Image (cartoon, grey):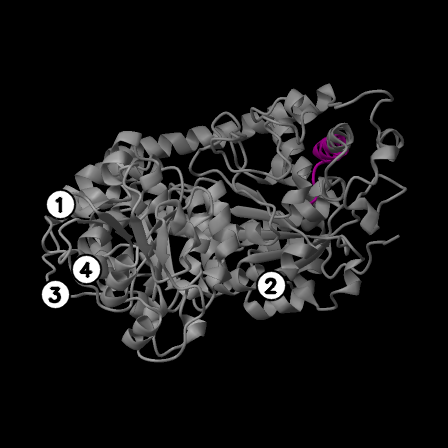
Amino acid sequence: KRKIINMKFSMLAIAATFLAGVSGFSVAPAVARQSSVLMGAAVDVDTKAALATAANEARGLAMDSIAAAASGHMGLPLGAAEIGATLYGSEMSYNPDDPKWINRDRFILSAGHGSMFLYSWLNLAGFDLPIDELKQFRQHHSMTPGHPEFPNSEHNTPGIESTTGPLGQGVANAVGMAASEKMAGATYNTDDHTLFDHHIYVLAGDGCFQEGVTSEAACFAAHEKLDNLIVLYDANEVTLDKMAEYTQSEDILKRYEAYGWEVYDIDGHDLDSVQATIAAAKASNNGKPKFVKCNTIIGKGMEETEGTNAAHGEAGVPYVDKAKLSIGIPEGEKWYVSEGTRDFFEDVKAKNKVTYDEWQSTFKAWGKANPELATQLDNAINDNVPSAAEMIKTIDATGATDAEATRVSGSKTINDIAELVPHYRSGSADLHGSCRNYIEDGGNFGAGFDKSYAGKNFYFGIREHAMGSILNGIAYHGLFKASGSTFLVFVDYLRPTVRVAALAELGAVSYIFTHDSIGVGEDGPTHQPVETVSGLRVIPNLDVYRPADAEETVAAMVHSVTRKDGPTALIFSRQNLNQNVDMDYMERREGALKGGYIAKKETEDLDVIIIATGSEVQHALIVAADMPGARVVSMPCTSVYDKQSAEYQESVLPAKHTKRVAMEAGVSDIWYKYASKVIGVDRFGFSAPGDIVMEELGMTPENLAKEIASM
């Protein structure tokens, strides 16, 4: 079994740093100020005893809940209990009666499998998570699902700041939250009033730091000097299959120092050390995010499994009763919380309420002094934006008559959106110049060069996975809408984050994916998506828009910022597309907002319906011009169309008219839901000019006409 040895920094040195207000560690000052440091650093005896008791009772709650469910992960809740006690009992600022208070400290459990850690501490801290819900851990319709879920239509557990489970996501989400807090401070704080000055805490394990997304996000956080971020590494040296040494041998502290983080190395079970370190990390405003390696024993308190990979899951269930006795839980008691612990957290709540009330007074005074900013902030908090119907009428007609790439159309519309929605932000994974999603006159976010925290444009670097996670973190933080861009073919680098955004119902997130098909041309099959659009369409609760012209692009972007219950992916072309000038611009916008509409109505008895999307709509219109009995249906978003009334769908695609053909420069399977014949691309492309690739693979008016003639 593992013993915790060789701590890099003593509690004394950490405390000296905290009291001195410096960013590094210096032994001499610590020795010189030994007596005063010890007096200021150590947790007072009564508080320390209360925290230690709470830590053990939190362990008991986790053991009982996991035993009742016969499922779950016991190792982290037992191994990190002192960290939880310090955060919720001493160092974090929060109000359980107002869990959405905008200046609360945020805590994210990146190692989401250890969810009973979070549920136990939320219950102890006084959040509206009753003990009966802990007893229903992992059960249907409970408030305690297997992994933490951000409040949504399925779960509404207060105090959950992020949906976690896929390892590493929580760390990268926390980077997004830290960026959002910096933006909020730069946007709303004034010389006279400070509204935003909170910290973002995240607890993560070995698995989180083995995942590459944390490295991407950590580099971004250090480069943009997000010193309001504190990462607590539950360093128990255990992974699921083996002890961690079997798969890792790096010095993680040196790695994070090299990124530009301030690092600490402590005993994660020593309450004095944990408290002093977190206090020092909070006080260190030196432009460096903080990385605290908390050396812990996984499953601490359960002799049979602690310190081994067996402690990770529910293998300790048979030993629960014995373990609870060993840590002071009364025999026979289940889900036991002492009166002393309840009283202690009532005192914590009262102390935090003082801070909360003082902030409310500041907020009120700020609002009186800054009425316009107050309105803007209220709109941001409540996501008050004009309706889609209002917005498409407010944005002027594009006036586009010449062929134009939808990425170019989008570059114009995004600036209209930014004016109408002041809390909208955008960014790119090193492809602003290609994806064209730059907000003019919005400034650039970050530190150094021409950047500031008030900037509206994010430069994520070539870090697509981190970009997706950071966007989710911004959305979780609750004050800004955000979009990010890259080439469509690279969406698989961030696909896990898109999936989580969809299941977490993050309407504040959208994606701008350009270079949408084999029309990319010369770059070849590595850069020509064929399966990708349909691969996104099958993600539940993700709306995927592939507009056909400039006016449909306006509607698509409007949808992305007015949708409330999930994310939107915008799929834009690299190559120029014809404009449907024979149809009124507002009719195209209104039709696109419904996901599908009649782009050209037949002039004789209906014979064939041509369904197309994106760059293929222009081919359908050309063919239908010579076919009086042909109807063209533009379907930029299948999921939105499918939500329309049965009456509307019947008016667009009458059930009795089954002679239908669909066309898209992508895999064909999804379109058989709407058509009996599909002209698609069910193979990878090749390197050649885009028009040649399109012609060779059948994406032309001539081939469409030929296929219709064969029906």
What separation in Å lies between label 2 and label 4 (alpha carbons)? 71 Å
- Callout 2: 10 Å neighbours few (<14), some, many (20+)? some
- The nearer-to-camera label among 2 and 1 is 1
Mark 2 or mark 1, earlier in chain: 2
The location of residue 469, given as percent across then percent down, is 49, 53
Could you tell me if residue 191 is visible in this image? Answer: no
Q: Quadrant of residue 338?
A: top right
- The nearer-to-camera label among 2 and 4 is 4
> Which residue is found at the position 59% from the left and 63% from the top?
212
Residue 623 got which mark?
Answer: 4
Q: Please name the amino acid that badge 1 sits on.
A: Met
Mark 1 or mark 4, earlier in chain: 1
The magenta segment: 41-59
What separation in Å lies between label 3 and label 4 (alpha carbons)? 19 Å
What separation in Å lies between label 3 and label 2 (alpha carbons)? 61 Å
Q: Which residue is mark 2?
A: 24
Q: Please name the amino acid that badge 3 sits on.
A: Asp
Q: Which residue is mark 1?
A: 586
Could you tell me if residue 152 is visible in this image? Answer: yes
Q: Quadrant of the C terminus?
A: bottom left
**Secondary structure of the magenta portion, mostly?**
helix
Q: Is residue 423 above or below residue 415?
A: above
> How many badges with numbers are in the image?
4
- Compared across the picture, whether 461 is left or right of 53 comes to left
What separation in Å lies between label 1 and label 4 (alpha carbons)? 24 Å
Q: Please name the amino acid that badge 2 sits on.
A: Gly
What separation in Å lies between label 2 and label 1 (alpha carbons)? 61 Å
The location of residue 314, given as percent across then percent down, is 79, 39
What separation in Å lies between label 1 and label 3 (alpha carbons)? 18 Å
Q: Quadrant of residue 363?
A: top left
Q: Which residue is mark 3?
A: 402
User: Judging from the image, what secondary structure is the residue with disc 2 in?
Assistant: loop
